[in-house]
Amino acid sequence: MRIVFAGSPGFAVPSLAALHENFPIQAVLTNPDRPAGRGKQPEPTAVKNAASALDLPVLQPGVFDPPFLEKVRSLGAGLLVVVAFGRIFRKEFLDLFPLGGVNLHASLLPRYRGPSPITAAILNGDRETGVTVQKLALKMDAGDILGVRSLPLSGRETAGSLSRTLAGMGAELLVSALRGLEQGRIEGIRQEESRATYCSLVNKDDGRIDWSADAGLIERMIRAYDPWPRAFTTWGGRRLNILAGGVYPEAGEATGTAGGKPGLVLAVDNRYGILVNAGRGVLFVSSLQLQSKKPLDWRSFLNGQKDFIGALLGE
């Protein structure tokens, strides 16, 4: 079973490596190099780097025009395998593959169809998530399910750590599903449309903290938007990233302490860190980063910012 693999971010790299060990890959399809960093120099995707290291042919089309479609047709691949490619394929492209296509998705479908299932699972405080291999369909993430693997969540995961875990699980599940397809051992199971939920693309401003929210939600934001775009607030006209923290256990269910405004920096607790009033409860902050400065633990931060206690964040 000859394959064309399509993917772009680091999440897709374990799957590419696993498939390379088990199946012939005719080419790797990934997004074009894009400007990044302060110098805005074009940088390749993580998948392009991995494919080059494996000495696999790389395709980076800007558009899926007729010459590109003909080039893919000439590869003679039977199956398209997609892992976090970031585009929806048209029928004319999918029709190039006699066996169709399969996709690895980082959720327990039909829950969290869309581009940010890992972030969504953390934000919503889910107790489990997982990975699903599905047949590619013209409707986003709606194809028949070929395999599922679940993972219990501890409530301490960040988007970065959970992504790494699910990427490894997904690679194993993907190989197993493709073996089953090749040997005719598995058939797709239709998704229950009535149970479908959706998530949207994460934007750089999504991490902005609304201090009138529950401290538990803010804590989940810190983890869900790590490593990007980070949960953040403002102080003195500058962005302040909140890198780590949690719900202060001694605040109880009350609204802050002594009726302080949401976003008010209340005090410090030597066991937890800086205490900030939320709409319900108190958030402790153990690590933070002021705009253009390096990340610091809370003690080091306060050593350089003596007027932080009593400040009102988010104004």
Image (cartoon, grey):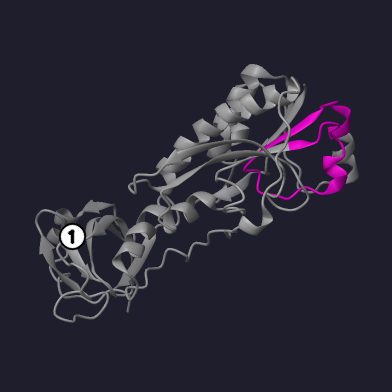
Crowd tier of the residue under label 1, counting other residues whose Cα lies within 10 Å: few below 14, some 14–19, many 20 or above: few
User: According to the image, label 1 marks what residue?
Assistant: 249
**Which of the 4 image quarters holds residue 225?**
bottom left
- The residue type indicated by label 1 comes to Pro
Residue 141 position within the rendered picture, expressed as x and y whole percent measured from the top left: 67, 49
Residue 266 position within the rendered picture, expressed as x and y whole percent measured from the top left: 15, 72
**Which of the 4 image quarters holds residue 231?**
bottom left
Q: Nearer the viewer, residue 154 or 11?
A: 154
Residue 273 position within the rendered picture, expressed as x and y whole percent measured from the top left: 16, 58
Residue at position x 65%, y 28% from top?
177
Q: Is residue 226 left or right of residue 74?
A: left
Q: Residues in magenta? A: 72-101
- Number of callouts in the render? 1
Q: Is residue 200 left or right of residue 246?
A: right
- The reply to whether the magenta stretch includes residue 76 is yes
Q: In the rendered view, would you say 157 is above or below 261?
A: above
Residue at position x 9%, y 56% from top?
270
Residue at position x 78%, y 30% from top?
79
